Amino acid sequence: MKFELTDEQTGFAEAITDLMRSADSVVVARAWAAGDTASGAGLWKRLADLGLTALVVPEEDGGLGGTLVDLAVAFEVLGHELAVGPWIESAALAPQLEGEMVTAAAAPLAPYAADAQVARLLSGTAGATHASIDTTRTLTEVSGGDPFDDAAIDRAVLACAAQLVGAGERVLADTVTYAKQRKQFGREIGSYQAIKHQLADVRIALDFARPLVFGAALGEVPVSAAKVYASDAANLAARTGLQVHGAIGYTAEFDLSLWLNRIRALGTAWGTPAFHRGRVLAHITSTAPAGSPAEVI
Amino acid sequence: MDLTLSESELAFQAEVRAWLAANVPAEPLPSMDTAEGWALHQEWEAKLAAERLSVVSWPRDVGGREASLIEWIIFEEEYYRAGAPGRVSQNGIFLLAPIIFDHGTPEQQARFLPSMATGETIWAQAWSEPEAGSDLASLRSTATRDDERGGWVLNGQKTWSSRATYAHWGFGLFRSDPNSAKHAGLTYYLFPLDAEGVTVRPIAQLDGEAGFAEIFFDDVFVPDADVLGAVGAGWNVAMSTAGNERGLSLRSPGRFCAAADRLVDLWKTNGDAAPQARDAVVDAWIGAQAYRLFTWGTVTRLADGGEMGAAGSINKVFWSELDIQLHETGLDLLGADAELLETPWMDGFVFSLSGPIYAGTNEIQRNIIAERILGLPREPKGLSNKEVAR
């Protein structure tokens, strides 16, 4: 029994973080949102060279043979550093050995294909295009696309949940930094209990979201449970982060907005909370009777 | 990451499960806060102890079986799943014993731990005072040196002392240096509740039962042998977290997983009549699973030599609020029958309401999380004792 990341996994996360920070991933994301996808494609290639899109492809097929825990580790960083591009599709839903940028719709969980303006649509015909509140995501209607198997969908949901945890962590970290600097009534706003207690609640929510994501990666709980909890926790981080920042947080210019809008978008992408609560309910009411010995600890 | 149990852990699990299945009373025992229920709970503790199941993680010579932290969690999981009686010895075995292991003399360990393990001696905590609640360090009860008799004389008043109505011994902090303020000059004392000068006045709780009490001290003599840790070091002794590996700051996930499973069962029978409770049932189950998985992470850290530290506060806020959420949802599912005392849900709900208050209010816990984990600035200093006295 060991419920903790290995040094190798932590090192992998650090490698992704370093690469994205040295590439200025937030600047890349802003360019991507403005329609200039060149720097984003460059960063994509460097991350793909680390093996990200082939992470869960078995070794015998030429991939890295990583586990779903490895996948969750990577996606938490992608959320934290605001990765752009169809990572969920290309690394989780339909992992790409050659690092190609691909996309797909998977109704009803993901009725639109993300980033089809730059990525290859795996199947079906592209239709009308819509803007998202997350300006780094362009959404395209797809007709006649092939369905995905349950394992592929579950990987995508897991990756989405992990990204939400990462994005929530980033908002919390940036908000704590702000609350230590910003002074009102002669002292740091972070010294007031009204602020402290809200931020403590975000810390608590994220601390319990992460084990669910890794637990889902290990098959201990349905991925739906992780998605529900991670999106609630990330939403709490976003709402609190905005409130603590005040008006500056409400501006498009301030980078916080990028994460706030990402969290809002991913909260309903890959299955709404209502959809996933329904799946959890089906799981807990249909499996072996509660408390039966078959249940693992 | 790997959540599979070893062969020996699985064998331990099977043994505990089989024993509980054969021995847990078919009918719930009467409340431990009644004379009849108290006696039956003490008998149950003796039965557990005879199998070395009352304090599995303790050393063998004081009644345990040297179970690992993982095995302790397994035990707790099985215990609550089996619906076994509440632990009347809880204050002693979870709050006091870790301190005795770390700070007690060998003589104190030999004298106090075995009878605590069998449930023969039940302990009550005596922390709060009428004017010292969340601000515990402002406590005023005194301990005066008595060189002639070789000990200390206690005076003052403690309150909200869980189990003190029927318990045999108490433990708590007293101000042994009259010139000290706040955390300094406090000493940790152990005292029999039938000692001369001790008066215990039961307090009826929200549900009418005398689960806690006030304790009055009128020149109560405590020999040096019953001082726990160094004189003047009481605050650090009481707050030391070194006892984590014996389960001090962990609240076992077993009780919440078992409650969540019962909630799902209740949903199966009553859900049609209370469809609005659907999301709350799901969220309560997810919350219990989150707590279970989070705890395995904590256990891994502690087993690798890590410390609980301020993370215990994250734990405490979460489980105490989850417990209320679980029981509120159960009551929602019962509809108009919720107020009836014949189901276990109202009893559990009323108990859960105390969770965010005891063991450090959740407001205090959130301050700790904000200041010690997030690193936010401390509040400007409050008033000292002397300033308050003015």
Image (cartoon, rainbow, N blue to C red):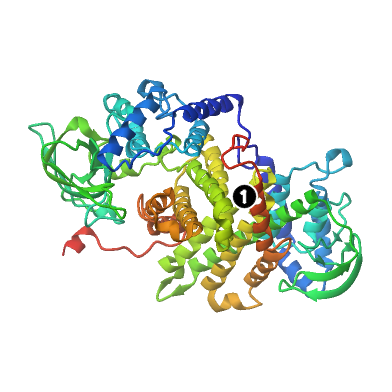
- Asked if residue B264 lies left or right of residue B161, the reply is right
Residue A132 x/y as whole percent? 75, 73
Measured from the top left, where is residue A244 in percent x and y?
52, 71
Residue placed under numbered mark 1 in the picture: A212
The quadrant the N terminus of chain B occupies is: top right
Classed neighbour count for the residue bearing mark 1: other residues with Cα under 10 Å, few (<14), some (14–19), many (≥20): many
Say which residue appears at 46% left-offset and 57% top-offset: B331
Chain of the residue on which disc 1 is drawn: A
Comparing B213 with A36, the one in front is B213
Element under disc 1: helix
In this view, the residue in front, A12 or A61, is A61
* Image quarter (top left, top right, bottom left or bottom right) of the C terminus of chain B: bottom left
One can see residue B238 in this view: yes
Q: Position of residue B29 (x, y in %)?
A: 36, 38
Q: Quarter-wise, where is residue A90 in the image?
A: bottom right
Up-down relation of residue A69 to residue A126 (above or below) = above
Vertical relation: B377 (above or below) B124: below
Q: In the visual, does B2 lie left or right of B139?
A: right
